[in-house]
Image (tube, rainbow, N blue to C red):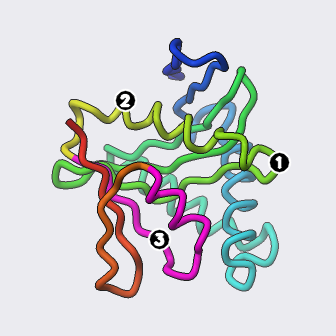
Amino acid sequence: MLKATNSPDQSTSYSFIFVHPSDKNWNKYVDMCFEYLNESWPKDFPNKDTIKDYETELKDRYLQKDRYFLFLKKCDKIVGLANLYFHNGSLFVAEYYIIPDKRRQKSGYESFVNIIKWAKGKAKDIQIEVDKDLKKANKFWQSFNSTLDDSGPRNIFTITLE
């Protein structure tokens, strides 16, 4: 079942739809996951054959409940994806990706604002774990007035929901 969340107060409509393994959009979601993984970790995901094991993991995670795969949309066009899950009262961002030609246009920020609105009342906060060397990603998550825990091997950003 697909659901959409619109942001009516924006001059441009940002929304998202939920995707699941039996959905007609599943293969497109997995293909975009490969784009993200190949861009971020090209040595680990050098070609599409390497995504099969990851797709199996995604399907297994979906069956565990509280896992959400989203296509992020702007004016009904896909601009990215998100992989989210709830655990111990928090919403965790496993993956968040904006396609390259939609970056630097507020698509990532406005899409995440919709996720924040959706998460309110469902979680106490949102947690995002980011590689320390990904400067643009770290700057992006700081833009949400998040707190940063940089004491471990990766940065952990927390966005408190009111």
Q: Is residue 69 left or right of residue 123?
A: right
- Disc 1 marks a residue whose amino acid type is Asp
- Disc 3 marks a residue whose amino acid type is Val
Residue depicted at 71% across the width and 39% down the height? 79
Residue at mark 1 to residue at mark 3: CA–CA distance: 22 Å
- Magenta range is 125-143
* Residue 89 coordinates in the image, percent (x, y): 17, 48
Residue 101's disc is: 1
Q: Nearer the viewer, residue 142 or 120?
A: 142
Secondary structure beneath dot 3 equals strand
Asked if marks 1 and 2 touch (Cβ < 8 Å), the reply is no
Asked if marks 3 and 2 touch (Cβ < 8 Å), the reply is no
Secondary structure beneath dot 2 equals helix
Q: Is residue 58 magenta?
A: no
* Residue 1 coordinates in the image, percent (x, y): 50, 22
- Sequence-first tag of 1 and 3: 1
Q: Is residue 140 magenta?
A: yes
Q: 10 Å neighbourhood of mark 3: few (<14), some, or many (≥20)? A: many
* Residue 123 coordinates in the image, percent (x, y): 22, 41
The residue at which mark 2 appears reads as 118
Secondary structure beneath dot 1 equals helix
